[in-house]
Amino acid sequence: MNAEQQYIDLYSQQRELIARRSAPIMNALRDEAFECFRQAGFPSRKVERYRYTDVAAAFAPDYGLNLSRLHIPVNPYDVFHCDVPNLSTSLYFVVNDQFHEQAQPKASLPEGVQVMSLLRAAQEFPELVGKYYGTQARARKDAVNALNTMLAQDGLFVYVPRGRAVERPIQVVNILRADVDLMVNRRLLVILEQGAQAKLLFCDHAIDDRKFLATQVSEVFVGENAHLELYELEETHAQTSRFSNMYVSQQAYSSAVIDSITLQNGLSRNRTDVSLCGEYSEVTLYGGVIADGQQRVDNNTLIDHRAACCQSRELYKYVLDGQAVGAFAGRVLVREGAQKSVSQETNANLCASRQARMYSQPMLEIYADDVKCSHGSTVGQLDEAALFYMRQRGIPEAEARLLLKFAFMGQVLDGIPMSSLRDRLHYLVEKRFRGGLGKCGGCQNALNCER
Amino acid sequence: MMEEKNSFVRQVAEKKYEYGFTTDVQTEIIEKGLSEEVVRLISAKKGEPDWLLQFRLNAFRYWQTLEPPTWGHLQMPEIDFQDISYYADPTRKKAEEGPKEIDPELMKTFDKLGIPLEERMALSGTAVDAVMDSVSVKTTFREKLQEQGIIFCSISEAVREHPDLVRQYLGSVVPYKDNFYAALNSAVFSDGSFVYIPRGVRCPMELSTYFRINARGTGQFERTLIVCDDNAYVSYLEGCTAPMRDENQLHAAIVEIVVMENAEVKYSTVQNWYPGDAQGKGGVLNLVTKRGHLRGANSRLSWTQVETGSAITWKYPSCVLSGEGSQAEFYSVAVTNNFQQADTGTKMIHIGRNTRSTIISKGISAGHSQNSYRGLVRVASTAEGARNYSSCDSLLLGSSCGAHTFPYMDVHNETAVVEHEATTSKISEDQLFYCNQRGISTEDAVGLIVNGYARDVINKLPMEFAVEAQKLLGVSLEGSVG
Amino acid sequence: MLEIRDLHVSIAGKEILKGVSLTVRDGEVHALMGQNGAGKSTLSNVIVGHPSYEVTQGSITFNGKDLLGMNPEERAHEGIFLSFQQPVEIPGVSMVNFMRAAMNAKRKYQGLEPMAAAEFLKLMREKRKIVELDNKLANRSVNEGFSGGEKKRNEIFQMAMLEPTLSILDETDSGLDVDALRIVAEGFNKLRTPQTSALVITHYQRLLDYLKPDVVHVLIGGQIVKTAGPELALQIEERGFDWIREEAGL
């Protein structure tokens, strides 16, 4: 049986159940998505954007799904202690794909701002959700989109109305929690209306010693002159496979910082597509990957300059040890008419062991002449001269290597505008390099955690 | 004023493709279409031994199982492989006629191209093998080279006279299973050049092949094989032209190079196939597989190419660096104008220890053209201490063209250092104004700046070629700035 | 303090030092002179344990301990400091973190507790003054974007922090203007004690004017061909190296 068949069977048999436990807006797109998936199946590695990840193999094993949406008993505060000094956030939890209604932050959000279950939002604000849902993450474009659209029943909804600024960062902790091997299909919808501002921090954790397969499809809308900072930090474990597709569309004069840090994982495939739709919009993409053991991290980005005078910057850095495999494919597309585009893309990688592998593929595709675009990519090792210099000053070799790796990764973190988060990430990265980060860095007293 | 400008534009337009004459040469063409019979016929006409026929047939059978590749950044017209004649021999007036003689018309053709045959060669010191349509028509300086044991002849002759060498190396670098066009070429290749430089010999002159497609409705499938033995050296030049034709002409060649211990090969190409007219009609489809195998320790291979012609260029002169300490270079200038499309670059496959490669690519796009660099640098786990540096720059002239960069880096060894950088820019208004102020026309200024931009690559060409290449750059871009 | 006996050193199979012997006692300053390629930098690199050099014969002891068996950081902890000819830039590693790592590694080696942050910063401030090093430079990444003079001052600053007993100055004067040379040399002199020694590698007299060596050695072709008092440096300044070469019958 091929990897697709179990999902085709699942949907064919459980279509009613899936729909009954979700909302009409989400249900409306399921059949079409199913059709797309049935026809196209999983992409082979000959498909350019999936060169470095064998999708079918990741989806082949048998996972359970919580389609009837049984309540999973968990007190997130028991398992999650965010020890970020000076990082005061409005904290929310999503357990698998369910928004945790019981745990609400004490401080209230500005008027009209919503952070809530997507399912509930689709029921309470059908017009708003319906206007945006599924408009960027098209099922025919991508198998993960199709699969997620056909199976996802809930997720997170973030809405910042026109002109509202949310000062305090919104922190969302995604917890994977199950007593059986579990597949989770989570959906995110983030809407910043004209002139709105928000900072979002997503932390992904897996607290049970189970296999997890999570698909997450995020659609992010950044309105005119709106400003978004969005951070994703993955600290799951070796048995977690993550397929994340994030679509960001930006209107004129908007700006966005999208940051993706992978510290602990099994297999992660993060696709990030940013469309600069309005003039003078700006985006900065940062990515940091620290991987060893059998970790695999495949970041695939597209920055699409559709309008004139937009700017994009991209910096991804990998430190690979053990038998880790890293892949980076970053495509910058400047469309006809997108004059005065400025784009700079950098990918730098350190391989620290014989078995570690790195694939790097920065791409420029340009159809306008008045542009300034560049990209650079390097794969190499620590600077031997710097290493010796440090040893001559009495710094032990292992410590010197660590300092250099830390400095290398530091360049990704230094650009983060939110200083408290920057400090926190510096701390986590250092801890990770020192091997002090367990399978779930922020979590303690993990339920059923056998490791 | 207006009129003056118009006349200038007309001049430029008229001068666009200087080499677009056809030659009235008696040519023997076999029926269009491709089948096992045709493959057998080609082999029979050339009186080939059975092993070569089998090689062709294996390739043909394999080709039938393949689909043309679609991954290039190219809008490829549908090619009807049954509507092409796979063999055209301009030297035969009639099939029964005796020993081959060179048609005087053919000599005139090469004169028009400015290719020095016979006496003129003695002055410039270049040995030339000229390939028209599918057949090698003349190899000069053969005797002089023979004194040093150098073999430079058509591949058909080599099959007859040096069968062991050809059999040993043919298909050893580019196997017929390599890709769709390589399989096609392996089935139907008609001629090409063969070079063997024996151990310890420095070839005293540049070896050169000129290719020309002449006959209507024919494809050209030449095959070049260069073997450079231990401690030997050769510099090889390849030039190409074709007449103006409305329909697309297919050119699917293979070049194989074997470089042994301490040997060095320089391979330079100035490709000026007919690019099609200003509306994108006609032009050569240049679908070529070129690869060198650096087998011996400390061997060296450099590819230098100036690509200004062809409607579509699909070629990736590549290097497999097996020998310890071997070094490979790829220098490329690709110019596209009007509706030309180029998807070109290189592959550097590092297998041996301490191997080094350098890639310098300059793309220039104008008009409605699309110009892509595509390159792969792979460092195998065995390639301890491998180094690669790649630099790919694109220059855009006009707002309707495209410039793209698709580098791939696969690194499987932690001691490797691989660096890639790329920029895309246009000629700045300031630069143009500065030239204008000094009395240089915009056209000339563009030519100057482009030549400066491509200088790193042009400098790698042998002298005579460099001059030709510079002129070509100018001609190819004329009319692109208004 | 430092005892080098019949030292033979190769790099990539090529012999650079061909039997060097040298003794530096407590409190002494030795100058090592010679033309480019004589092997001066090789000698300094071998003393601090650069991994590219292979010692094929001979010994180096430091305060009676065998140096050749130690890795570079242990040699540093023992009190040997090299002021590099071309200090390397280390982007992303701040001077403060760098010095603290070095300082605490040494303290650990000596069986001491790590220094408290406040105390450490105070020490940094004090020592900076010795070489007139700007506070801004101390907050930057190691040597990154420093001018040639600033890099050399930064080397002496680090020497002040780590308080070595043997300092090797490898062409610390090269590329310095008169003022920078004065600052570096005076900084070095302030750090001297009767127990500290130095090996100064240079082409020129002008640094030696400040440092006043007790002994001058001339290295030619991988061997020390002449050893004398400070007057030798003055003679070389005046007459070059050829006469020594002739005298040695080379």
Image (cartoon, coloured by chain):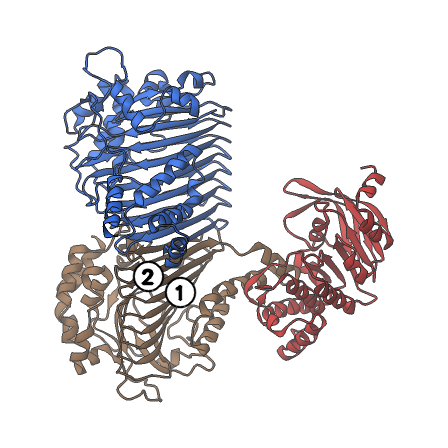
Chain colours: A brown, B blue, C red
Quadrant in the picture for residue C78: bottom right
Quadrant in the picture for residue A135: bottom left
Q: Residue C46: x, y in percent?
A: 70, 51
Q: Nearer the viewer, residue C101 or B245?
A: B245
User: Quick check: C89 above or below C112?
Assistant: above
Q: Residue C141: x, y in percent?
A: 57, 67
Tell me the residue that label 1 is attached to: A287
Q: Is residue A239 visible?
A: no
Q: Which mark is residue A301?
A: 2
Which residue corresponds to the image point at 67% horizontal and 64% vertical from the top-left?
C155
Identify residue type, mark 2: Thr
Asked whether the residues under the numbered discs 2 and 1 touch, taking CB atoms below 8 Å apart as contact, a structural biologist would say yes
Q: Nearer the viewer, residue C213 or A270?
A: C213
Which residue corresponds to the image point at 32% horizontal and 61% vertical from the top-left?
A301
Q: Residue B29: x, y in percent?
A: 18, 23
Disc 1 is attached to a residue of which chain? A
Which residue corresponds to the image point at 25% horizontal and 26% vertical from the top-left?
B134
Mark 2 and mark 1 on one chain: yes
Element assignment for label 1: strand
Quadrant in the picture for residue A116: bottom left
